[in-house]
Each structure stands twice: as structure tokens, then as C-alpha cells.
Image (spheres, helix red, strand yellow):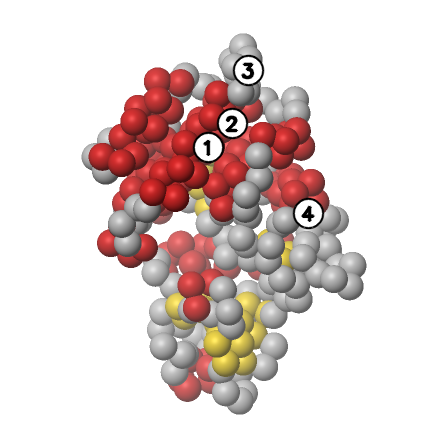
Amino acid sequence: MSPPRAVLDAFGCAGTATALSGGQNQSFKCSDAVLKPVEDGVEAEWAANVFAQLSASPKDGFRIPTPIRASNSQFVYQGWTAYRFVSGVTGPLGKWEKLLNTSRSFHATLLDVDCPSFLDSRSHPWAVADRVAWEEAHVEVVPCLQKIYSRLCSMREKLVMRSQIIHGDLSGNVLFDSNGAAPALIDFSPFWRPVEYSEAILLVDGILYFGQGAALLEICNGSLNLHQMLVKAALFRLLARNSLVGLFGEITVDKVNSFEKLLLVILQVKPASISSY
């Protein structure tokens, strides 16, 4: 459903909104704004405030869209948010190292952002999957994923690492510009975890969704506790898919095979001594 006229007017958007590809087909462009419905108004308002603070000054290594305040002086209006359009297309193939560097530049600017209280009360599939991956909750796993899930759980170890606000879904939410502009981060998906976890999710996504193999892990050589971060990131993606059967349909044999391939790649990574900080 496209944004109502009242929403467009509230964000100062003239003309007609047109649907954009991607973003689960929920994003609409009107003038130089991109509008999107929100599922959690509190989280969306918080995320927009973070981006507003970051966009107030130039940043090295990445771009972010500037959020637009509505006529009610808030960033959320009648269940919608709006950001200034940023150029670029998604797709990390051939750009993995650039994506990793973008992630590190972005996360360095978030070190002083406090943990928001709403994170503890979220109940969407990704929030639940994250908690289970970190042994903070438990869910039932469908039979076709049970063996892989059990193997990953057996590889888990306790970690004490510094957490901060991270973006937990970078692989499909960074725009690359063909004219040389820095990559742009969109659709902030916040979690309170170590930065290395965000990087591991990026690597896991490369193997699961973009046909990459063990060679992709070389871009993170020397990363702290890489083996354990990969185990937790793999659990995160597996558990999220486990909970999304109602939305995305039954888990296919091909999807199970993808998780088996991921497990084999992780088994090739030599577990290092656990480092805490």
C-alpha cells in the first residue's frame, strides 16, 4: 500500500509516490524522499534520531540518508518514516572488502550510542533468533534444521566481549554508487552486540545467499573470535528462517543444503583461544 496523501503532505512530498524495488516492496519514492511503513514506531523514531545525529556532519567511508521530520516534529507520522533519497544499488558481489570497510567506518561512529531499552522487548523473528543464538532464549526448531542447529549449538562457547549498537543486516542494505560516492547504509537493523558479530553475519550472508565459499572469510583474517562469531551468526540466520515459515513458506531442500554448506565452511575455521575485552 502506497503512503496516503496525508502522509506525503506531512513530510513535504509533492507529487505521486512510486514503488521502489527491494525492501520487501514497501519503499516508495516521492520527490527526493523515500517513504517506508514502520512496524515499531519507537524503534523507527530512535533509528531516525541516530541517523539525524550522524548526518549532521560529513563522515569518511560511508553515507547515510538524512531522515525527514514530519509536520508533527517527529520522524514517524501515521506509521511512516521518510528519508532523503541516496543513490546506489544493493549487491555486494565483488565488493565484499569495501562492504567490510564500510561496516567498520560506520560502527566506529556508534561507539557512544547508548543501548536503547526497546531492544529487550522486541519479539520479531530476528530479535528472538539473536537472543537464542546468544543463549538468552530458547525456541523449537523444525525437524529439517534440527541436526544443523544441534551441531552449531555444540560448537558454541561463552564469550565476554564489548557490545555496542550494530547494524545486523548489512549485506542487502548497503548501496554502492557507480559514480564513486561512498557506500550508503540504509534500513538500520539495530542490535546490542560486538561489532565482530555484525561482520560475521555479513560473511554468513555471503555464503548463504550470494554463493560465496570459504575464501570469503579471508577478508576477516585476524578478526577477534572469528570462529565463535560465525557460529553465532549462523545460528542467527538459521533461527530467523526457522521462525519465518509462515511468511516465506516451508524450508526447501536447497535452503537446508545452503545451511549444510555454511556449517562445513565454519568447521574449516580453526577455533582460536577465546579472547575477552
Q: In the rendered view, would you say 171 is above or below 32? A: above
* Mark 3 or mark 4: whose residue is earlier in sequence: 4
Q: Residues within 10 Å of mark 4 (few under 14, many from 20)?
A: few
Q: What's the CA distance linking mark 1 and mark 4?
A: 21 Å
Q: What's the CA distance linking mark 3 and mark 2?
A: 11 Å
Of badges 3 and 2, the one in the foreground is 2
Tag 3–tag 4 contact (CB < 8 Å): no
Amino acid bearing label 4: Gly
* Mark 2 or mark 4: whose residue is earlier in sequence: 4
- Which picture quadrant has residue 237? top left
Mark 1 — residue? Answer: 261
Mark 3 — residue? Answer: 270
* Mark 3 or mark 2: whose residue is earlier in sequence: 2
Which residue is more in the foreground, 212 or 70? 212
Mark 4 — residue? Answer: 94
- The location of residue 258, given as percent across then percent down, is 43, 39
Q: Residues within 10 Å of mark 1 (few under 14, many from 20)?
A: some
- The location of residue 39, given as percent across then percent down, is 34, 60
Q: Is residue 33 left or right of residue 60?
A: left
- Residue drawn at the location 51% of the way across and 27% of the way down: 265
Residue 131 seen from this side: yes
Find numbered disc 4 in the image and state the secondary structure of the residue it sits on: loop
Find numbered disc 3 in the image and state the secondary structure of the residue it sits on: loop
- Residue drawn at the location 47% of the way across and 63% of the way down: 23
* Mark 1 or mark 3: whose residue is earlier in sequence: 1
Amino acid bearing label 3: Lys
Q: What's the CA distance linking mark 2 and mark 4?
A: 20 Å
- The location of residue 60, given as percent across then percent down, is 74, 49
Tag 1–tag 3 contact (CB < 8 Å): no
Mark 2 — residue? Answer: 265
